[in-house]
Image: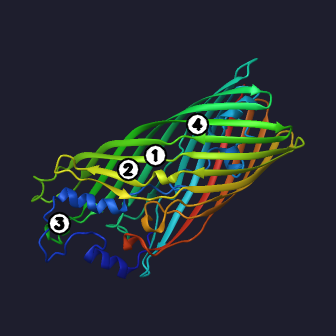
Amino acid sequence: MTKVNSRGLTSQKRCWPGVRTPPFRQRPDPRPPRAQIAWLLLPALALPVAAEGFRNPTIGTFGLGRSGGRIAHVDDASAVQHNPANLTDLQAPELAYEQGFVYASVDYTSPQGATAETREPWKFLPAAFAAWPLAESRWALGLGVTSPFGLSTEWPEDGYFRYLAPHFAELITLNVNPSVAWRVRDNLSLGAGLDVMWSQLSLEQAYPWGLVIGNPAAPDGLLEAKGDGVGVSGNFGVTWEFVPGHRLAAVCRAPMDVDYSGTFRASEIPAALAPLIPAVSDFDSTVAFPTMVQVGYGVRLGDAWRIEADAEWIEFSRFASLPIKAGATLPGVATSVPQNWDDTFTAGIAAGWQFHRDWNLRFGYQYFQSPIPDETYSPTIPDADQNVLTVGLSWRRGHHGLAVAYGAVLYDERNIRNNVNPAFNGDYEITVHLISASYRYSF
């Protein structure tokens, strides 16, 4: 539900804070109107809220239940995602479907006391995995279909950020990951995979045509940008049981760039500007996705317990800017939005307890750093440092297996005071809950 105090909202409707266009009593800006559109959209343009930067939460039910330690001892088909080297641990071919549910809500309070809350908090993240250990062989094959980055943010269309940021921002990804693993020796396995990721970026924002033409009675327009593209990368994993019961593991996912091409639309264009501004034009952008390197140490204590600690480095500094090109049919506006994200580090610990032949209990803790500096923080990608507590329960009998997991994400409150866009200063409280359920079938 929108919670915008009347004084803050009335002030916005009168003067459109944050829009760099002249007041009504002045002549309209002589720059091409398309350039004005781009300059309005650019300061706020970012990617949607997710678990960490624009990375989605831990994928899969096993991964969520053991979020802090999951790469040394993963022994189901989701090894395709977490560590392809461990595909050699599977004893039989396996198919798995994993359904993730994310509840994500953001409450904002401006320095003047205006408040707003995001809408549509529930998101859905499906994943599917297949694994085939080759009979009488040291080789195994795997395939994963996941959504490693994305989610979305939706603010009320008539709320505090109406003219300041996109009220709707969505990044969708679909990654197809074929993998192969080889048991080099009884205690050493290697794995590698190919990542082919399709992605779509969508943005919607209100635009005050009245400021462009000097007529406060002119209706607002809607700016819509949507584009998609494909990126290709790879991943590599290794697991080494250097002494019985003790494992070291490492995984690297290489960086990827996705070039987005699509359409930019503007509605309610005033008649006086219609000959100059096409309602539909080209939209292009590029997102640089990070390198991710993870290491883990796992211990097996008897037949019942497995304990693991993982650490991860993520090269979010690749996302230094977001280039934008919109309106190529008019005098071109090709520029970029500074992001200047920082590399981050995560660390965690997790355990699995097989307390019954058919049942396994998992739990974990993981700490995540936010890559987003205060200066380039945006309401379209609210983020903060976070502590994540997870628990999971799985059952397996014969060919069938079921599992559930839950994660409580405890975000620090983010207090922004020195943003390059003063309209984004304020306090952001983020609430996230993670749920995952899965079914697997072993042949």
Q: Mark 2 points at which residue?
A: 202
Residue 212: assigned label: 3
Foreground: 342 or 281? 342
Residue at horizontal 40 percent and vertical 79 percent from the top: 5
Q: Where is residue 194 in the image (x, y as percent from the top left)?
A: 54, 32
- The kind of residue on which mark 2 rests is Ser
Q: Say which element carries label 1.
A: strand
Compared to residue 240, the image places residue 272 above or below, namely below
- Badge 4 crowding class, 10 Å Cα cut-off, few under 14, some 14 to 19, many 20 or more, is many
CA separation in Å, label 4 and label 2: 28 Å
Q: Which residue lies furthest to the right in this view?
A: 302
- The kind of residue on which mark 3 rests is Val
Q: Disc 4 or 3, which lies upstream in sequence?
A: 3
Q: Say which element carries label 2.
A: strand
Quarter of the figure with residue 153: bottom left
Say if mark 1 contacts mark 2, CB within 8 Å.
yes
CA separation in Å, label 1 and label 4: 21 Å
Q: Position of residue 434 (x, y in %)?
A: 62, 54
Q: Say which element carries label 3.
A: helix
* Quarter of the rendering occupied by the C terminus: top right
Q: Mark 4 points at which residue?
A: 235
Q: Disc 4 or 2, which lies upstream in sequence?
A: 2
Residue at horizontal 11 percent and vertical 58 percent from the top: 271
Q: Name the residue under label 1.
A: 172
